[in-house]
Image: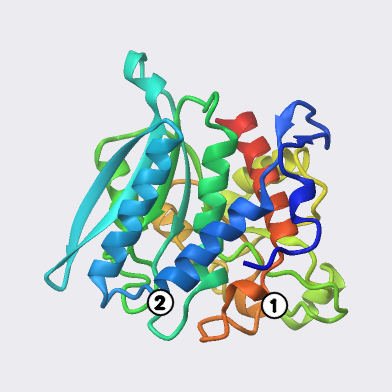
Amino acid sequence: MKNHPNDFKRQGQLNTHIRPGYPCADPVKFQHWVEYLALEIGPRPYSSPKILRKVADRLSVGFKGLGYNVDEQLYYYKGETYCNICASPKKEKIKQDPVPLLVVGAHYDTVSCSPGADDNASGIAGIMELARLISRDPPLGIRLVAFALEEPPVFRTRYMGSFVYARGLKRSKASLRGMICLDMIGYFSDRPKSQSFPLFFMDRFYPNTGNFIALVGNTKSAKWTKAVKDAFSQGTDLPAESLNAPTIVVGIDFSDHRSFNRFGYPALLVTDTAFYRNRNYHRPSDMPKTLDYQRAAKVVDGLACAVRTLA
């Protein structure tokens, strides 16, 4: 594996941006997860349930190795079994009173033609690195969830892994602080005009260089988005932009956070903005070599701070 420049400079270092004393996310570990999923496993479509099962088992082992309880949420689609992997702190076993939950989730499937490095091996790598960063003292109520299916043909249906999970929360009357969805968090560019937008006038208010991470949600999740962005920015120097808009704006609900919105929960998407920046979206060219692991690790640093602050 060819390492990116300065990959090893952050290993073992402490995060000294605003919140000293916390470890940094490791770009090398992040990259290892992306390469495992995109290169060793490859495309992970709904039509390959055995491959998805293999990924689920590997994620389960990863969470358990970090000291988490792991539950499998099984469901069925077209006669096949699919599995959400749900990690929670072990110390909750001795806690009597339930606490409000904070869910951080990402899908691990892909479209059939793509190895899905950015979409969405990067989101899963983010979940696993976040799990490592907070593993010594994970906040009570945190739930780290790898969703089985998100891509077409199940997108916007009840067969999305996130829909199954959010519906389960609603049926159990669980209290939820909010949900953070990670979908495509690894592609960045310093080239001017590398960023496009769903509406022609948005470049008046947002940078046209794709060197930032975006926090996106519907209008009802505006308070949650602000809270997450404020906490996120205390843990990283990576620029973050936010947008809350009606779902008629293309892309606002294009991931697993929409399932939580459907059940009335505040939820947002953390993203590099997908096809508004990354031309490899849903293509065979969505490969690990196209990602920026230094900046992706900074996304995880911000997420760790947000989780510690809000959970």
Which of the two labelled residues, at mark 1 and mark 2, occupies the earlier sequence position? 2
| Residue at the image position 41 percent from the left and 79 percent from the top | 111
- Per the image, label 2 sits on a secondary structure element best described as loop
- Image quadrant holding the N terminus, namely bottom right
User: What is the crowding at mark 1: few (fewer than 14 residues within 10 Å), some, or many (at least 20)?
Assistant: many
* Colour scheme of the rendered structure: rainbow
Say which amino acid is labelled 2. Answer: Pro
Q: What's the residue at 83%, 48% (across, down)?
A: 237
In which quarter of the view is residue 197 placed? bottom right
The answer to whether residue 254 is visible is no
**What amino acid is at disc 1?**
Arg
Residue, x 37% and y 15% (percent of image)? 95
Q: Which residue is mark 2?
A: 43
Q: Which dot marks residue 93?
A: none
Give the vertical position of 304 relative to 297 (above or below). Answer: above
Residue extending farthest front = 1
Q: Which residue is depicted at the point 30% across and 52% down? A: 57
Q: Is 224 in front, or is 7?
A: 7
- Residue 77: x and y in percent read 19, 68
**Image quadrant assignment for residue 207:** bottom right
Residue 129, given in percent of the width and then of the height, sits at 57, 46
Q: Secondary structure at mark 1?
A: loop
Q: Where 257 falls versus 94 (above or below)?
A: below
Q: Which residue is mark 1?
A: 277
Along the viewing direction, whichever of 182 and 301 lies nearer the viewer: 301
Q: Are marks 1 and 2 in contact (CB under 8 Å)?
A: no
- Residue 300, given in percent of the width and then of the height, sits at 65, 48
Say whether residue 1 is left or right of residue 45. right
Q: Residue furthest left?
A: 79
